């Protein structure tokens, strides 16, 4: 078989060599015979030389023939063996770009003889050649890429194109969670772990707080918090030293690993501390701020090299924490300043008790997470502390507006009395009532009460409640203090103005009666109408879009609006009718001996007159509209009822778009 495989070219060469060898050999033998027979010395010498040359030439030709024969046979045998090996060789093809949703990867067996290899499909790496073969995950077929690269890389392979973190401006906590999850994913894949988790260590509340986790387990705890105890994660947080188990006892797994609801058959466990150079709330510098946990279902899966690797990751996480906290503090300070500025601006535009209360509640909602909010202030008319604002974000039963507070035995009463905040981290462990005895609210979650106080006086309390225990931090308390202090300053200024207005009869700006004098006259007119059986109507006139006017023309421009409106009202009333400035943007008018339908006709004339009037201010001209509410006084009606009814119809006129008159 080997001889038949020899190339024909080599066979011809051997045949030629054999014929030449015979001729030379014959010539040499002839020369030897001649030299023996001839007795001439010179002839014998020449014949001897010729014989030696012939012998040498034949020897060289024989060696050449032997060498060519061995080379040809070796090549034939090597080719034969290669064919036998190639007929049985198989390849294992692994596609590392598979994206199976379950996280599984597949390796398939490919017969070498089934893969066509062409020179165009060969990739050069150094001095070796490798076919560019890739496996299609969905079809399971082998594909030969005829280009230099076997995979068409996209930007999504190196960048999270669809991530919300890059689509819009995000706050620091979102960025930190995003980067932390990326790190945990890398740790899990590098260590082939079952679970990787990151827990904050809150020593002030003796809790471990879950921040992020990457786990294959469906039994991971649903709650983000669990109390510090004798489990391994808590030990690392307390001691600041790593903990490792190469063989977890199944009987004690539930006590050692508190972050699973049910036993998970964990065999190996490793937890390392995370330190931070910035002292966080409730942490000492030499105590860890967090713990990174890694576990596996394989026994003795983590060694000393794992400690070293995790140490590098915890250093990276420490840098992230420091950057996150500094950025968060700056952002939080900025948000608090913005909230204070908005509160002050709203109070300046409409300086009233209701505006201050509403603004305080809105700004507290922007910064603090809560389920219930209330504001308690003192009411001079009832001589008691009342709930002046209630916001309920849940469907549970809570406080009602104007609820009287048990002072000073309730938690809110203690806050107001002592002028110190009250924090209850877990209401289920508290025996005191929050607002009043017999309250029916569920005693669950966290309760925080902050005094609304200036340097001279406590005006009430801002109260927030959450259904989660340990929901409010020390930083939350400081933020709410800053808000309540500014609200208290506004309340103090408002009450000082009221004291001054006690002795003022006429409004300095518009020349009409002050609010207090207007209300005092209302009492007398109601009694006179009841005694004489005469008609009495009350009218409220409100400037539409007053905030926009202030924003565009300032308070001086709005003052010009109120002066113009006051002139129009005074020009159309009788001398015995009473006109007063009820608040910053509203006038009140008492029309004596006037029925409600007649007051409606008068109000329509005022509305049209104001809408058609042009106001000039600092070279600018503009017009305004008003919303008007009209209510006729009934026999026996109190001033509070008359004011309430008139305010209701005025608000309806404003809510319908303004420039309107409504009658109660």
Image (cartoon, rainbow, N blue to C red):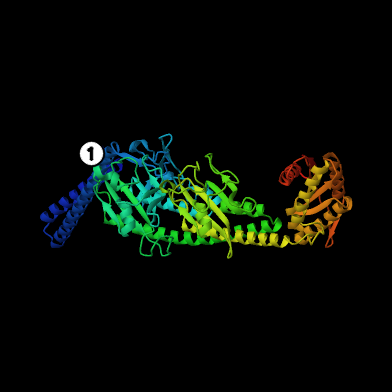
Q: Is residue 371 above or below residue 43?
A: above
Tell me where residue 32 appears, x and y as whole percent: 14, 54
Q: Secondary structure at mark 1?
A: loop
**Crowding at mark 1 (Cα within 10 Å: few <14, some 14-19, many 20+):** few
Give x and y (percent) for residue 41: 13, 62
Q: Is residue 168 visible?
A: no
The residue at the far front in this view is: 531
Which quarter of the picture shows residue 618? bottom right
Name the side, left or right, on which 140 lies relative to 501.
left
Q: Quadrant of residue 200?
A: bottom left
Q: Which residue is mark 1?
A: 2
Q: Residue at x 64, y 59 (%)?
A: 491
The residue positioned 55% from the left and 55% from the top of the image is 461
User: Is residue 448 placed above or below 99 in the rendered structure?
Assistant: below
Image quadrant in which the C terminus is located: top right
Q: Nearer the viewer, residue 23 or 485?
A: 485
């Amino acid at each position: 078989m080997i001889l038949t495989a020899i190339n024909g070219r080599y066979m011809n060469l051997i045949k030629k060599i054999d014929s030449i060898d015979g001729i030379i050999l014959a010539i040499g033998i002839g020369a030897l015979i001649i030299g023996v027979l001839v007795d001439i010395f010179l002839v014998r010498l020449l014949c001897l030389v010729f014989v030696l040359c012939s012998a040498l030439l034949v020897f060289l030709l024989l060696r050449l023939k032997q060498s060519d024969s061995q080379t040809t046979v070796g090549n034939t045998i090597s080719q034969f063996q290669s064919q036998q090996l190639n007929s049985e060789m198989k390849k294992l093809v692994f596609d590392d770009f598979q994206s199976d949703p379950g996280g599984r990867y597949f390796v398939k067996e490919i017969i070498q003889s089934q893969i066509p290899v062409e020179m165009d499909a060969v990739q050069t790496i150094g001095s070796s050649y490798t076919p560019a073969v890739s496996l299609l995950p969905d079809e399971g077929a082998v594909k030969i890429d005829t280009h230099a690269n076997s995979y068409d890389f996209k930007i999504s392979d190196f960048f999270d194109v669809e991530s919300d973190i890059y689509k819009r401006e995000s706050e620091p906590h979102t960025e930190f969670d995003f980067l932390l999850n990326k790190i945990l994913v890398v740790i899990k894949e590098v260590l082939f772990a079952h679970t990787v988790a990151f827990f904050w260590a809150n020593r002030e509340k003796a809790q471990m707080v879950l921040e992020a986790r990457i786990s294959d387990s469906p039994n991971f705890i649903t709650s983000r918090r669990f109390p510090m105890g004798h489990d391994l994660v808590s030990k690392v947080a307390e001691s600041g030293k790593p903990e490792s188990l190469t063989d977890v006892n199944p009987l004690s797994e539930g006590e050692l690993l508190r972050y699973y609801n049910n036993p998970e058959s964990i065999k190996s466990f490793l937890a390392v501390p995370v330190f931070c150079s910035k002292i966080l709330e409730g942490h000492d510098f030499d105590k860890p701020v967090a713990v990174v946990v890694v576990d596996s279902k394989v026994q003795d899966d983590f060694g000393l090299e794992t400690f070293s690797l995790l140490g590098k990751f915890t250093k990276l996480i420490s840098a992230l924490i420091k950057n996150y906290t500094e950025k968060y503090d700056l952002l939080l300070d900025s948000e608090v300043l913005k909230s204070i500025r908005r509160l002050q601006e709203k109070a300046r535009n409409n300086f009233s008790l209701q505006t201050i209360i509403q603004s305080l509640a809105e700004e507290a909602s922007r910064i603090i997470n809560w389920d219930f909010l209330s504001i308690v202030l003192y009411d001079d008319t009832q001589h008691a502390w009342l709930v002046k604002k209630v916001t309920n974000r849940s469907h549970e039963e809570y406080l009602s507006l104007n609820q009287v507070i048990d002072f000073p035995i309730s938690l809110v009463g203690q806050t107001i009395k002592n002028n110190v905040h009250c924090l209850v981290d877990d209401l289920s462990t508290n025996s005191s009532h929050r607002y009043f005895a017999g309250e029916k609210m569920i005693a669950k979650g966290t309760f925080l009460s902050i005094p609304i106080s200036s340097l001279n006086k406590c005006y009430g309390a801002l109260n927030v409640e959450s259904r989660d225990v340990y929901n409010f931090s020390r930083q939350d308390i400081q933020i709410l203090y800053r808000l309540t202090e500014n609200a208290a300053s506004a309340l103090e200024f408002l009450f000082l103005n009221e004291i001054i207005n006690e002795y003022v009869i006429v409004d300095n700006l518009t020349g009409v009666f002050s609010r207090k004098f207007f209300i005092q006259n209302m009492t007398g007119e109601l009694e006179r109408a009841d005694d004489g059986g005469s008609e009495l109507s009350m009218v409220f006139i409100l400037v539409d879009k007053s905030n926009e006017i202030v924003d565009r023309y300032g308070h001086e421009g709005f003052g010009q609006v109120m002066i113009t409106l006051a002139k129009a009202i005074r020009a159309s009333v009788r001398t015995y009718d009473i006109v007063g400035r009820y608040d910053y943007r509203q006038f009140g008018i008492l029309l004596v001996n006037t029925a409600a339908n007649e007051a409606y006709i008068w109000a329509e004339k005022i509305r049209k007159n104001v809408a058609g009037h042009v106001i000039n201010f600092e070279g600018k001209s503009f017009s305004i509209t008003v919303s008007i509410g009209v209510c006729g006084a009934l026999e026996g009606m109190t001033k509070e009822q008359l004011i309430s009814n008139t305010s209701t119809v005025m608000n309806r006129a404003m809510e319908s778009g303004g420039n309107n008159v409504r009658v109660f």
